[in-house]
Amino acid sequence: MNSISGATTSSVAKEAKRMKKGRISGNAGMTVLAYIITLLMLFPFLWMLLLSFKTNSDILNNPFSLPETLSFDNYERALTTLNMGLLYKNTFIIAVITIVIEVLITFMSSYALTRMVFRSERLRRSVTAFLLAGLAIPAFILLFPVYRLTLSFGLLNTYASLIIPYIATSISFNTLLFTGFLCGFPREVEEAAIIDGSGLLTLGRSVVFPIIMPVVATVFIFNMLYIWNEFPFAVTLISDETMTTISLGISQFKGRFNIDYGGIIAASTLLIIPQLVFFAVFQRFIIEGMTAGAVKG
Amino acid sequence: MKNRFSIILMACLLILSLAACGSNSTPKNENASSGAGPVTLSIAMHVANVKEQEPYMYGIIQKFQEKYPDIKIDLTGAETQEHVKKMKMMSQSGNLPDIFWMLPAPAKEMNKAGLLLDLTDFLKSNPEVAAGIDSQMVSDYQDGGKQFGLPYQALVTGLWYNKALFDQYKVKVPETYEELLAAAKVFKANNVVTIAKGSKDTFSTWAFLGMLTRYGFFDKIADIESGKEKFNNPDFLKLFNKIDELRVNGAFPENVSTLSYFQAVEMFTGGKAAMLDAGVWETKKIEGSPIAKTAGFSWGPTFSDGVGNQKIAMAVAAAPLVASAKVKDDPAKYDAVQKFFAFFYSQEGAAVMAENEAPPVVKYTGTVDKAKYPVYAEVISKLNEPGWERPKAQPDLVVSEAVANQLNDSIYGVINGIYKPEQALDLIDQKVAK
Amino acid sequence: MIWLSKRRTIFFMLIPTLIVYLGYIIMPVLISFYYSLTEYTGIGAARFIGLDNFNRLLNDSLFWISLKNTLIVLAVALLLLLPGAFLLALLLNVKVKGGNAVKALNFAPSIVAPILVGLIWVFILDPQMGMINVILTKLGLGQFALSWIGGKTLTPYSIGIVFTWQMIGFLATIFLAGLKMIPRDVYESSSMDGASKVQQMFRITIPMMNETVKINVILIITGVFKIFETVLLLTNGGPNHLSEVMVTYMYNVTFTSGEYGYGMAIATVTFLLTLIFSLVYMSLSRKSIEE
């Protein structure tokens, strides 16, 4: 008996070693592949970086040539035209309030829709489908009515004027992600907690929320970036200069019959870098969140 | 602990309601006050960055505030299409700014709905303003017995040309269509674009709209709209066949369908195209480009088979500056609006306009420094050249937005080689029928 | 679960979402639907004309072109984007050096301002001065230098490719979250049983990713029917509406031509088509699971 188990142990160890080795060499190949793909994806972006040092006429007439001299004119113009601090402050305030509220309410509703017992299954399904239908709605058809609503609530030119429509338009996306992932996730853990006597709030806060942390992080990142780039609502509901958000920045470089491409490219470069850093940082929570959940599970 | 969720929710609601209250207690750009105190005028323009993109308007506002320190101006803007959309939305909810820029067709609609201030009284009490603006341009914005707006700028369009390229290939700068066609053939053989254009921006058809007036557009348009005549008539067809002929002979860039107007401009200022279909708003840009010394402006070709006077110079009213009918409810505001219009069309205003090389809407009596602004001086001299008739308007500005849109689309359809001339005209007729 | 599911509790959990959704999404949609039954320029009063706008739609060749183009983009996205995003997620799931940076950079295309996407891709795809054709011609392969955009046929395919480029990082991130949710011990116990990597892929990863795939397919369908800025800036629907997709055509009719009522009719039909496509997919995928 002893010898057999000994053999098994050593073969398992060998196997593990072999796997580890394979993983390393596989990783080298994977790394190269990942870099190549990233480079391909980034190519247009790198090109944009190059264009940001060229004059407008050079950008349109000789897009492929290397800039003759490294000119920072475009960046200078971008920085004098845009009040970056203000843009970031407004966008950030709007984004944080929006995301806290929407994650809370859509998580609650999605949890109810996937875990709770409805009187009829049909009702549950139709409420879910009803909430998902919003995904099919292009923002343009909401503009006129939402403008009216905002005006009648006296909210024009306030943060709330954007916060409410942003929450509303995120409901469908969040519901899709939350219900989708909750459906695919086993309920045994929760049931054990309930048997231990936890109430709904404890259950939500200390059992379920940590488990689906990767999804919460994903929802958080996407909504942040959505708000960062959202244009139709922002341009419609905000006219006060002190309320402008990042997404409105680009339009500063457009006239009736002219466009300052150099300024736009430089401004976009300046705006996209913080976004990438933000994404890189928060991407981690998708991974860390999972490890935390796994330990508890 | 147990209540944390509800506490957060309460907090959020509180924030929301605070934000809501905050805005209610400090109404912005709404009727500030009446009577003696300072008045706030809200002005909305069609670019997001008025200071940079419409320096003319910005300069006037600065000067105006210096002169009338009691009148505060709250200036806002959004890019053209967004601006138009916004004004429509505001008009639905009775929330229009006091003064704003608008495209002619929707401005007319707003006037029909009784939303715009009638400026007839203003012109009567300010005869010097009425005398300063081209009378044709003033009458463009009259409808239903009301003067619903005044021209913001002159729309002066035609064909820019680069004399250097014409000299290089020994071609005459065309005055007639035959000369234009001959030049196109020479340029094509030498790989030079004759007329730089970009169909991605379908609005950029100015020179061709001008040509339409040389085939009797304004004699026919009333009949076309009442159904007695068609766009697909023998005269317009002659013009559309000529556009097709220019295409076949390689007068346009080969990739015209993927170019934008801005690329076309760069093509011209970069010396790669002999001509550019545009207007005098490009003056400042051309003035600052390498071809400034050799650039010229023309009214476009005349046609031997055209209808009526061929010497038509497209210098018309661009788009109106209008005021909300509501300003009349507040005497102080009404007074401020009138002061603003009076200042805008005064010689002081015209001076700001000239400084910014904007097309003059008021007869400007100052002089232009020829050495410093050769291109602007050329434009001004073209405008003052005797013997040229001014049309009523640019053709697309007297029809509905839908027909105007199709008109541009049809012209580009022929230039792109997508539509046959008859087909292009039929498509416009279909829109008129609706 | 049942003893937590008091009606009052369910009500409390659903109500905030429902209030915002009804007020800011459903009500505006109903208002827009009403306008689709009218003739309206966006100014003044709307005139009720019943179903005339929908009748007009049936005979509007541009509407059918925009529908056809949208479906082409959808096909390209399903064939290219979906598997592409999945493979990219698998790749990003392997620990590589600088993994976070790589993930972030792959996400870059979805956050570049659309106006730049338009500008840069025109420089790549333009038939005359675009990079692809310049290179092809230099290589002596001039016969393959086609009109990727601006011609009569290829534009929607090119749009599908640009859309794929834009969305792949976005969808890969969702796939990645799905991969991270698969408990690690499932893999560990299966490799104990001697399952190979490939077997693990087909027996564990793909079945357990079922919900994630569903999410992404729904996002692709709804995303494609909403494509707007990419087309607007790449071709502006041109030449002459031949590359129009449903939302750009709707936008053109509504805001450029000022036919608000007709535009809302197009929007209504677009909305219904998206719903139908999504529902058909959902019911198909449910069936395949049940089998």
Image (cartoon, coloured by chain):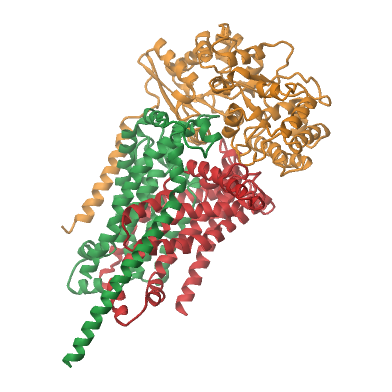
Q: Nearer the viewer, residue B35 or A7?
A: A7
B133 lies above or below C86: above
**Residue with the most extreme bottom position:** A1
x then y, percent, for residue B79: 49, 33
Tell me the colour chain A is drawn in. Answer: green
Residue located 50% across and 65% down the image: C279
B355 lies above or below B115: above
* Quadrant holding the C terminus of chain B: top right
* Quadrant holding the N terminus of chain B: bottom left
Q: Quadrant of residue B386?
A: top right
B429 lies above or below C80: above
Residue located 46% across and 73% down the image: C286
- The chain painted red is C
Q: Nearer the viewer, residue C90 or A271?
A: C90
C156 lies above or below B430: below
x then y, percent, for residue A129: 44, 63
x then y, percent, for residue B210: 71, 26
